Image (spheres, rainbow, N blue to C red):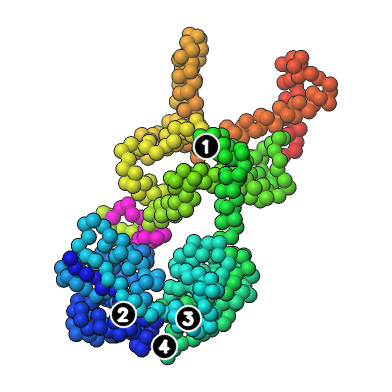
Amino acid sequence: MSTITVVGLGPGADDHVTVDTLRSIEHIARRHLRTAVHPSAHLVLDAPSGAVTHDDLYESADTFDDVYAEIAERLIADAAVHGDILYAVPGSPLVLERTVRLLRERSAGAAAHFTVDLRPAMSFLDVAWARLGIDPVEAGVRLVDGHEFATAAADQAGPLLIAHTHANWVLSDIKLAVESATGDEAVVILHALGTADEQIVHTTWSELDRTVDADHLTSVYVPHLATPVGYHYTRFHRLARTLREQCPWDVEQTHRSLIPYLLEETYEVVDAIQALEAGDDTAAPDATSEATADPDADLIEELGDLLYQIEFHATIAEQEGRFTIADVADGIHDKLVRRHPHVFGADTAHSTGDASSGADTPLDSTTVLANWDEIKRVEKGRTSVFDGIPRSMPALAYAAKVGRKASKVGFDWTDVSGAIPKVVEETGELVEAIDADDAREIDAELGDLLFAVVNVARHVGVDPELALRQAADKFRTRFEGVEALATDRSIDLRDATLATLDELWDEVKRVERSQH
């Protein structure tokens, strides 16, 4: 069994490199460097037979996770060929070295052909604590990775030491992650510690990404933030767990019992969105709603109610040991990255679908959707165009989705002129079924007629679910007007004739037209 010996090159200066590291470099002939961009890297490169570096991956890989995973694969493969090898990393192997973590995980596997020997080394932390003049244990400093700041520092107000801040764009992302920062919070930028170029820069949160030209030897110390990173969501998350544990009603709920509330809150979000445009005729007012004068306030409230339903389901699963809200967030994050190769992949400007043509296809929303569907089909291993369509969707939305999916493989009319005659045909068949007093056929033909109307809506670019909802809202508003007129004129609707109701209806319509 071979051994991968991992050594650290210290924070930067040669005199911070341990004797043990120097001895390992001398005695192990096959050597690797994670990166040659480090002041002490020459100690490995200048040794007899030199070293293999992996800087090429930083240019070719899509993400840092891909870089670290590929380095680990290269090291394991090289150890299988050459036996014992050396792997040198900046700083200490035990501080924020994801490649080392991957190697240790792989070495623990039953089929592993190698072991990992971690040699202690001095890290940039030792110099940082000396320059800052603090005891990190007594001060309770939290060390976080700059690439994962938004999640790794969640619910943390400081003190924080942020590593891997190797570029100003990383500093900018960190700054923007704390939306509630005032900008005048004190920060200390630690640059090139232990080298001749060392800088200790005291600045503020607003100037974090404007003070130094950050590189791989840059880190940031944050004594205190007024509001923790991710404070608002983590506070909400804790509340959901508290309610689940202490509120008798919340304790009794299950995934199934919450379904009606999930649907109700979703529809209330839809109502709030439709009400965003002041005076929008497509969003008829709901006499029973509790809408305020501020549509944004309504939308904020309804989105919060919907978010609570999501958090509620995740909390139930967490209590049962199945998954957590972190799994939900990670899952959707990774899925969105996979399905947006035009944003996160190598091909950021053109279609992934027509490589045979040899020509670049301009990227537009249609291309994006086509690529999305193809990536989704491959991911899910789907064999039918209808796989993945929830049968529990509202019927009109379900019918529209089914029609769209069939259309994508060519089973459709070329335009609406083919869909409209089908409505006439299905209407005739429904009339025949009604004349025959055949209940089963009436049910089937009515369904066919509705499906035909949905196809017409699809061809003219109208969402049938929203269109019917708007029509129902319009009818409701007008009939509420009829009720109001009847009340004013002491007419009992239950005793009124149809002719009287029609007159009231027509009067409401006339008033409505005069107002537009």
Residue at horizontal 66 percent and vertical 51 percent from the top:
296
Disc 2 residue crowd, few under 14, some 14–19, many 20+, Cα 10 Å: many
In terms of sequence position, does the residue under pointer 2 or pointer 1 come before the other? 2
In this figure, which residue is indicated by the disc labeled 4? 195
Calculate the distance from the C-alpha at mark 4 to the C-alpha at mark 3: 12 Å
For residue 41, above or below residue 488: below
**Coordinates of residue 415 in the picture (x, y in percent):** 43, 36
Whole-percent x and y of residue 32? Answer: 25, 75
Mark 1 vs 4, N-terminal side: 4
Quarter occupied by the C terminus: top right
Element assignment for label 1? loop
Closer to viewer: mark 4 or mark 3: 3
Front disc: 2 or 3:
3
The magenta span reads 342-355
SS label for mark 2? loop
Could you say which disc has been placed on residue 36 in the image?
Answer: 2
Label 3 belongs to which residue?
Answer: 128
What is the three-letter code of the residue carrying label 2? Ala
Tell me if residue 447 can be seen. yes
Label 1, on which residue? Answer: 254
Q: Earlier in the sequence, mark 4 or mark 3?
A: 3
Residue situated in front as seen by the camera: 515 or 135 = 135
**Whole-Å distance between the Cαs marked 1 and 3?**
50 Å
Q: Quadrant of the N terminus?
A: bottom left
**Residue sitting at x 53%, y 71%:** 140
Does the stretch in magenta take in 333? no
Asked whether disc 1 touches disc 3, contact meaning CB atoms under 8 Å apart, the reply is no
Q: Nearer the viewer, mark 1 or mark 4?
A: 1
Task: Specify which label sits upstream in the sequence, 1 or 3.
Answer: 3
The mark that comes first in sequence, 2 or 4, is 2
Amino acid on which disc 1 is placed: Thr
